Image (spheres, rainbow, N blue to C red):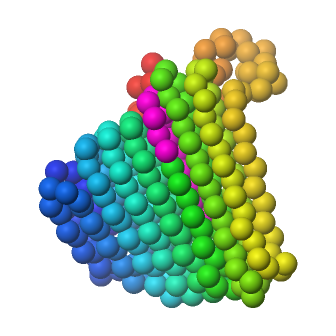
């Protein structure tokens, strides 16, 4: 798998399916990735007190899969994803960060398809802003945003899906859920800005703990409440990782640090 590591320095190891340009100084790190052929990319980010801009361009008819794991604190990050005609992108991201503001912009051209899976464990303040622009007909986007808030955690998701008039046949799906293990306020703001009738658009948002039924099912089998909560959180944060099942153990180790 191609690899991009963003730490004090930016290093990369990739084949001819990608073209990567980097710019790094004391003020900002900039990375541009052109995806030329069907491929997978693993991004590891471990920095603090930084501003980062990442642009990923998926070329026409290309199938691209991205796995990213992020550590650090006091980060400001902007991602821009450009999907050309009939491009497909699957993303799985896991954030192990604190005090982060992250903005992601997705531009989908004709018949482009996006599936974006985001997971985070929050113990301080984390704010995420998403803008999905359906610029071409018959484009499709699925966003699954999952967070667990504990200790002093406060989490905010602001999600906007946009389809302008005459951009027909599009599908938008926004599903957001925050599991709260504290009394701090968490926020989900789902927005659908639709100017065209020929569109399928859905959103769902849920903030709170696990249901009594979910806990009871496990506890009725002799599992303690704490262990039942841990198992539910683990399943929640590992959902949709099957495409990158080889990375599952890495995510489990991070989860275990918070509950073991």
- Quadrant of the rendering where the N terminus is positioned: bottom left
**In the depicted structure, whether residue 237 falls above or below residue 31:** above
Identify the residue at horizontal 42%, vertical 63% (top origin). 79
Identify the residue at horizontal 58%, vertical 78% (top origin). 108
Q: Position of residue 237 (x, y in %)?
A: 56, 40
How many marks are shown on the rendered structure? 0
Image quarter of residue 197: bottom right
Q: Position of residue 65 (x, y in %)?
A: 48, 67
**In the depicted structure, whether residue 138 falls above or below residue 186:** below
- Quadrant of the rendering where the C terminus is positioned: top left
**In the depicted structure, whether residue 107 falls above or below residue 204:** below
Question: Observer-nearest residue: 233 or 31?
Answer: 31
Q: Is residue 251 visible?
A: no
Q: Position of residue 112 (x, y in %)?
A: 61, 79
- Side of 92 relative to 158 (left or right): left
Q: Is residue 103 visible?
A: yes
Image quarter of residue 251: top left
**Outermost residue toward the right?**
197
**In the depicted structure, whether residue 157 falls above or below residue 5:** above
Question: Observer-nearest residue: 228 or 157?
Answer: 157
The magenta span reads 115-127
- Side of 221 relative to 45 (left or right): right
Identify the residue at horizontal 39%, vertical 38% (top origin). 99
Dominant secondary structure of the magenta stretch?
A: strand
Q: Position of residue 242 (x, y in %)?
A: 57, 53
Identify the residue at horizontal 70%, vertical 30% (top origin). 208
- Side of 13 relative to 142 (left or right): left
Q: Is residue 38 magenta?
A: no
């Amino acid at each position: 798998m191609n690899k991009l590591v963003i730490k004090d320095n930016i290093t990369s190891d990739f084949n001819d399916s990608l073209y990567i340009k980097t710019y790094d100084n004391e003020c900002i790190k900039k990375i541009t990735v052109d995806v030329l052929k069907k491929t997978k990319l693993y991004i590891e980010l471990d920095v603090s007190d930084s501003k980062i801009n990442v642009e990923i361009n998926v070329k026409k008819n290309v199938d691209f899969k991205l796995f990213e794991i992020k550590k650090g604190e006091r980060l400001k990050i902007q991602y821009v994803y450009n999907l050309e005609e009939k491009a497909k992108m699957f993303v799985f991201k896991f954030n192990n960060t604190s005090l982060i503001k992250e903005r992601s912009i997705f531009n989908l051209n004709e018949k482009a398809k996006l599936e974006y899976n985001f997971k985070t464990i929050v113990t301080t303040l984390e704010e995420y802003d998403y803008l999905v622009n359906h610029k071409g007909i018959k484009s499709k986007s699925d966003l699954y945003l999952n967070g667990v808030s504990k200790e002093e955690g406060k989490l905010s998701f602001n999600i906007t899906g946009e389809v302008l008039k005459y951009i027909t046949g599009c599908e938008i799906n926004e599903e957001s859920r925050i599991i709260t293990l504290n009394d701090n306020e968490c926020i989900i703001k789902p927005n659908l800005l639709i100017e065209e009738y020929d569109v399928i658009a859905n959103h769902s948002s849920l903030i709170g703990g696990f249901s009594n039924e979910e806990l009871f099912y496990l506890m009725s089998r002799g599992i303690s409440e704490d262990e039942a909560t841990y198992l539910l959180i683990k399943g929640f944060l590992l959902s949709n990782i099957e495409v990158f099942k080889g990375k599952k153990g890495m995510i489990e180790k991070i989860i275990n640090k918070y509950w073991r």
